[in-house]
Image: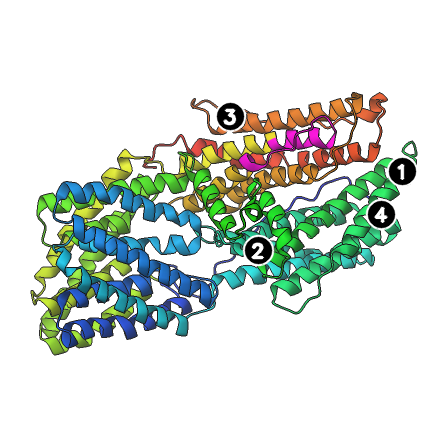
Amino acid sequence: MTRGSATVVLRRRLPLAVGGRGRPSWLPGWSRPAAMRAVRSTLVVPGLFAFGYLVLGDLQVATFAAFGGFATLVLASFGGRWQDKLRAHLGLALASSVLIVIGTAVNGSVLLASLMTVPVAFAVLFAGVAGPNAASGATAALLAYVLPAASPGTLAEVPARLGGWWLASVAGTAAVLLFSPRAPGFALREAAARCARALADQLDAALAGDSDPAVRTAVVEAKHELQTTFTSTPYRPTGLATPDQAMDSLVGLLEWCAYVIIDSVGEYRDLSAIPGVERKLLAETATVLREIGGLLDDGVVRVDLQPLERQLGESVEYLRRLNSDGDGYADAVHLSFHARTAAVAAHSAMTDALIAAHRADPSAVPGSRRRWYGETFETEALGERRLAGLVAAAGVVSRHASLRSVWFLNSVRGALALAAAVAVADLTGVEHGFWVVLGTLSVLRTSAAATGATALRALLGTVVGFVVGAVLLLVIGTGPGALWIALPIAVLVASYAPGALPFAAGQAAFTVVVSVLFNLLAPAGWEIGVVRIEDVALGCAVSFVVGMVFWPRGAASVVADDLADALRAGGAYLAESVDWALGLRTAEPQPGPAIAAGVRLDDALRGFLAEQGSKRLPKDDLWRLVAGTMRARLTAYSLAGLPNPEAGPDRFRTQLSEQAGQLAAWYDHLASRLDRTDHGAVPVLAPPEFRDPRAAGAEVDDLHCALWVGEHLRHLMGRLEELVPPAMLVADLRHRPWWR
């Protein structure tokens, strides 16, 4: 048995850009999901408009059917199983119905419409914290409100408007269910399954004495793939449902397990020579990890955690039987720490995998919820298990009801911007006030600089669309036959554009659709394009002004604040857990603040990376910071899972507690550099040195438990220095002028 002296440091690699050889970077590539979306929209939207206009002869039905179809098929992009998509589309239709009624009721008064827009828009935008489907449906739901709120109409027209929107909802939902690409959520499950199997392969190879570097490379690549899949979206790919929360937790546990296993294999070159009890524990860990992979692949897997639990107990008994004064005792505890940490992580990961696969014992769910949220849920006492979802939702809302939450700030900014746009559209008396509000909605970003850049692209795209539309109308004329032929083509391009073509191209395509659509309703020729340019320019100006006034730095400053919160909360949770594991604390550690801070940091960083021009910091450095806070939190969780010994303070335990306090102080010191108000130079921080209290002759009962605590601290301290450089970059970024 050999043990290396250095801790293996994992470095994430950025995914390689994919594209055709020789293709210019500005030229868009092929997107199958965008193509399927475009085909769905082309088949549905023109048909809905034709049915309402030509068959029913109702302009309200035709207009709301067309825009409702665009909202359902283009603006909303729901994922998950077909049942999840059906529920999401039903929820969007119901919410849109309420919003159409409210928008129609308030459009007669500028003051009432503007005031009502603030709570309505905030509620719709803030609901995105519930999960990816709620977030992706926010713009579609807002369209259902701003269309009637910024357009003339009376309550007598509500039935026709609702009829058109529900016509679009039914047809659009059917098209989505019948003709959709594979959901992104499955990609996350597949990546997690591959990571679990790769970890199992690594353990099996090490236990067999196989040191083939290709096995370790496969683990690193699988871990990177899992991280990339999980972090590639501007919001978390999991929702509030219990299986989604289990999947979210599983990703973090697999990353933690990968850190521990790769470090273990790096230190112990040949695991075949370790004591039999630890070898059996690692073998059972590999078995559980392989079963996780099969479970996530929807395979028929018989899961039995009792062998792993039995080996965990035998590992503890083995240490108790060893002579603590022997020369090899410290090495045995060190090995036991690696084996036990990997086994406990795999055990928790299997529990989450069972919940995610809808195969868990209901009695296991409450304990997992405490691990996810840091709170206790007494739902069974209330007699309704479904109340757990409501409690979870309330917990999410409370975590994000803070100026430290990018969701909260963006929701406030968006609500104020839309309210201002409604007021400006009414007060200026523009012909199509709806376009002003839609222009505001389409360009508002999380920072003033990103909003300004997007506004310029929107105006450029609108001008290009005006030119194309004007030329098209001059060539084909404004006759109904030619316009009906042009409408599906325009819808096809406009529906393909989001996410696949540059933003300006999408604006240009949508302008062409509007020109054709409104010329069918009331022939006006190319002049309709001029009106749209004016309205979009007005809406962009509103967005830019609101962006400058309210939090112009956007997510950049929020990331720094949330990172500071996550570091402080993680350090405090770690110190509490150390004292708990040492018997110096009787109250259980409270993980809630650390979990809440970690969630806010994850969301803020996703929003920051989604901004235009925010790539000034390498993405892998930013996610390294998130991983650092996660390691502190999961280390604390691992310590909190150790038994609380009935022992008074002694020299050994006191020194370990002091070192944990120093570590928490280091996190707090780093956090103070992130949320400081001065602009001075940031000093280089060094982590505290680890001291072995036994060297001073300290004695203690249950020495292996105390040494486990020391191993946790030593393992965590080895990764501190890699957090300093990216943290200093974030601290520097928040003090740059917002326009840079």
C-beta proximity under 8 Å, tags 2 and 3: no
C-beta proximity under 8 Å, tags 2 and 4: no
Q: Is residue 142 above or below residue 415?
A: below
Point out residue 521 in the picture as x, y percentages from the top left corner: 11, 67
User: Dot 1 corresponds to which residue?
Assistant: 328
User: Dot 2 corresponds to which residue?
Assistant: 226
Crowd around label 1: few <14 · some 14–19 · many ≥20 (10 Å): few
At horizontal 23% and vertical 69% (from top left) the residue drawn is: 490
What secondary structure is found at the residue carrying circle 2? Answer: helix
Residue type at the position of mark 1: Gly
What secondary structure is found at the residue carrying circle 4? Answer: helix
Q: CA distance from mark 4 to mark 3?
A: 44 Å
User: Dot 3 corresponds to which residue?
Assistant: 672
At horizontal 85% and vertical 54% (from top left) the residue drawn is: 272
User: Dot 4 corresponds to which residue?
Assistant: 314
Crowd around label 4: few <14 · some 14–19 · many ≥20 (10 Å): some
Does 592 lie within the magenta span? yes
Label 2 vs label 4, nearer the camera: 4
Residue type at the position of mark 2: Leu
Label placed on residue 613: none
First to last magenta residue range: 573-594
The answer to whether any part of residue 140 appears in the image is no
Q: CA distance from mark 1 to mark 2?
A: 38 Å
